Amino acid sequence: MSSSSVTEIIPLRTDSAGVIRIGRTRITLDTVVGAFCDGATAEEIVQQYSSLNLADVYHVIGYYLRRTSEVEAYLQARKVDAEALRKHNEARFDPQGVRTRLLARRPGRTP
């Protein structure tokens, strides 16, 4: 085996909403890192998300392990954004009694 330098590109892309996705899939970095941190192997992640490529998942896990603090900062920012969006939506649409209101819309049903 010759010792030549090979540069491989990490299969991550940022979509128009600023969400980091894996390769050409809709699977997010959050999903893969979350599964890995929950104890899933790369093979198990690919089994659960069949649109992922095994080599891409290994690259992403390696990226996460090399840049844990950067990825964790990104994930934390995503959580903060999600919480702000949840609060905004709840302020606009009261979540209390949603099930009752939806059931009341069904013909012949009473809450």
Image (cartoon, grey):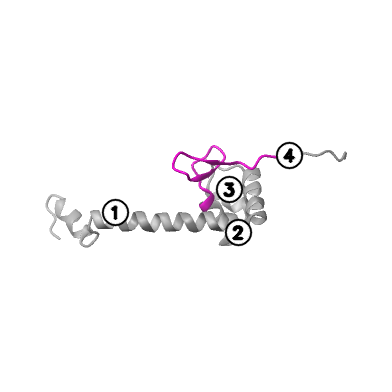
Relative height, residue 55 to residue 81 (above, below): above
Crowding at label 4, few (<14), some or many (≥20) Cα neighbours within 10 Å?
A: few
1 or 3: mark nearer the eye? 1
Q: Is residue 28 visible to the viewer in this orientation of the structure?
A: yes
Q: Amino acid at mark 3?
A: Val
Along the polypeptide, which appears first: circle 1 or circle 3?
3
Location of the N terminus by quadrant is top right
Along the polypeptide, which appears first: circle 2 or circle 3?
3
Tell me where residue 62 appears, x and y as whole percent: 67, 52
At horizontal 38% and vertical 58% (from top left) the residue drawn is 83
Q: Which residues are magenta?
A: 8-30
Relative height, residue 18 to residue 93 (above, below): above
Residue hosting label 1: 89
1 or 2: mark nearer the eye? 2
Residue hosting label 4: 7
Residue hosting label 2: 69
Whether residue 63 sits left or right of residue 19 in the image: it is right
Circles 1 and 2 in contact, beta carbons < 8 Å: no
Q: Amino acid at mark 2?
A: Ser
Circles 2 and 3 in contact, beta carbons < 8 Å: no
Along the polypeptide, which appears first: circle 4 or circle 3?
4
- Mark 2, secondary structure of its residue: helix
- Mark 3, secondary structure of its residue: helix
Of residues 45 and 71, which is closer to you in this image? Answer: 71
Q: Amino acid at mark 4?
A: Thr
At horizontal 80% and vertical 39% (from top left) the residue drawn is 5
Residue hosting label 3: 46
